[in-house]
Amino acid sequence: MVWSELMNLVKRRNLILILLSILVAGPTTLGFLTDFEVLAENNQLPFQPYHTETVNGVLYPRIGTPAFVSPGGGFKAYLEYKEREFKGQKDVRWEAKLSSLFSPGVDYALEVVEVTFIDEIGTWEVSLKAPSDLPDGLYNLSFTWKEGGIERTEPNCVVVKSDLSELTVALLGESHFGIKRQFGFIAFSESLKDVLRSAEALGVDLVIHTGDVIGNAYDEETFQAFYRLLVELKVPVMLTLGNADWDTVEHNLYYWESYLAPMEYSTDWGRIHFATINTDTQTVKDESLDWLNADLAAHEEAPVKVVFFQYAYWDVSPNAMARLPTIFQEHNVNLVFFGQDGTDEVKKPPEVPVLTISPLTTHSPIKGGFRLVKISEGAVETPEKSVPNWLLNVTYLQRNDGSSKAMGILIEYGQSEEKYGLEDFMQENLLRLQLPILLKDEGQEPSVENAQILWMNKKNGKIAMLVETTLAPGEDKLVKVYQKPDDKPPSIELFPEIVVNTVTLFYELKDKGLGALGIEFFHSEDNSTWNRLKPIIREDHPFYRLDATSSPIYIKATVVDAAGNEADFFWELEIPSLAGTPTPTPQPQQPSKVVLVLIPLILGALFAIVLQLYLRRKK
């Protein structure tokens, strides 16, 4: 039984034929299984089937697989059937809406044009139409089944854009995000946050991550942390699997699908078609190539087709090396993105079959970066090199999720003769940045330093605002947004790691105001004389480590926040390997019986000798 035949049977609602066909064909791969046969052209799904449930019950679009729509335009969404919730009920009347704290209105109802249930994969296909007065922005997509009391919301998954004829992409890869207290994970994750914030502040239309998003993580908490990071952003993100991400899947852990995106999918920015497949660890499955081929065939009318994945197509398995160039040429693919190794290069035909672009690796706070690419129906433009991290860094000092009542944002802008594509974001030789900020509403009008408020909205106990600032080359700036003066010092939680006599000081800074800005460590052997601890550099990031020579040692940290408040913190750390060995206390012992017998004899003999000497003197 081929998939297209099943879909035709579904269309005719001929359930008897479906059952007979399944009996004849034997077990068919349906639902959340590994492989499936490609749909007929008219029924090509924009994603490959899932292996697990999603956290929000929405299969498409997702936070890592957004949909793009113009006001008054339409798009399709796919919702997951869960037996424990619906108990066999499939004739469901769905209502849909878009929402965003950064939009003027509260909610925007979507017209539900058609709802179809696809039995083979346990999915509702919902055709939606956006209102014509819908403002541009990034929205949450919500579905409600009132009769059943079911509501599902996928955050940051629908982009509304009045002009979908062109876009500017921030291309990045190799972030290896993680939450473990290890040099690499900390450095890589902080670098990724700054890169995403820099791209967001520039106002790019889309971020595309070309793989190795997560760093070989086998815990759900890492994916939850990355998911929360994406929720805070106000720029849409498209993700594809890298070998480090696939490593998690090979351990039968499907957190990628649960929290982020399908493993393979496609989407459309107007008439610009995007598609991605999983290149695994340089071993591309034929099923993936079949799906890509069918997807591109179903979008032949798109004048621009962009395919992206991690590994370069000339550096993967033989089947991909043989088939991908042919697929690209047969379907007139215009552009390919890949990200492995951060080669930061542009290859053009005839050297390669199709224009191919890769960015710098993202995970280095200095050497890494992201590439700007402009795509339109008529052209693709990109500078010779990626924007390096040392040139532009935007660091939010607090979580931008509405939990903080104030926000500090540190912007570092270097100098370079090369433009890296930033000239499109400059005005009178000044770099113009727009910073989205979400605060907890404390009932007072916010004050802003070193920036101007462009837009502000208060709703649901939050303050959403967009502020703008400009920087000259070589200028750093600290933007401050607060409702009340920040007069409380920051704090720190220390997580010392002691291995033999080597002490590594991991820590987390906390602040109730603008955010913690800096830290200095000191150490002492007597808790009186303090020596400054110089940072060591690992992965272009400062860390603090020392070799103890005695136990205990004393640590002092001086922490300062963005308002200039300062506080000192002290710790006493025991170093087990250097602890003094205690002197054993002697235990009283009873003399042996032999000793007890000899003592009187010896004393008697000594008395006899002394007596004899005395008598001789008397003579």
Image (cartoon, rainbow, N blue to C red):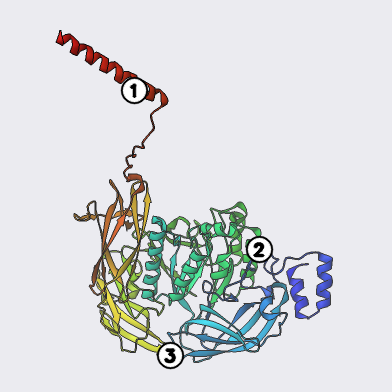
* Residue at horizontal 52 percent and vertical 74 percent from the top: 63
Q: Is residue 286 above or below residue 49?
A: above
Residue type at the position of mark 3 = Pro
Q: Which mark is residue 290?
A: 2
* Quadrant position of the C terminus in the picture: top left
Badge 1 is on which residue?
599
Badge 3 is on which residue?
104
Q: Mark 3 or mark 2, which is nearer to you?
A: 3
Q: Quadrant of residue 520?
A: bottom left
Does residue 248 appear in the picture of this structure? yes
Residue nearest the observer in this picture, 367 or 569: 569
Q: Tell me, yes or no, whether the two marked residues, 1 and 3, touch with CB atoms within 8 Å.
A: no
Residue type at the position of mark 2 = Asp
Q: Secondary structure at mark 2?
A: helix
- Residue 525 at x, y percent in the picture: 24, 51
Q: Which mark is residue 197?
A: none
**N-terminal label among 2 and 1:** 2
Q: Mark 1 or mark 3, which is nearer to you?
A: 1
Q: Quadrant of residue 369?
A: bottom left
Instruction: Farthest residue to the top: give it.
Output: 619
Separation (CA) of disc 2 from disc 1: 102 Å
- Residue 112 at x, y percent in the picture: 62, 88
Q: Is residue 411 above or below residue 346?
A: below
Residue type at the position of mark 1 = Ile
Separation (CA) of disc 3 from disc 2: 44 Å
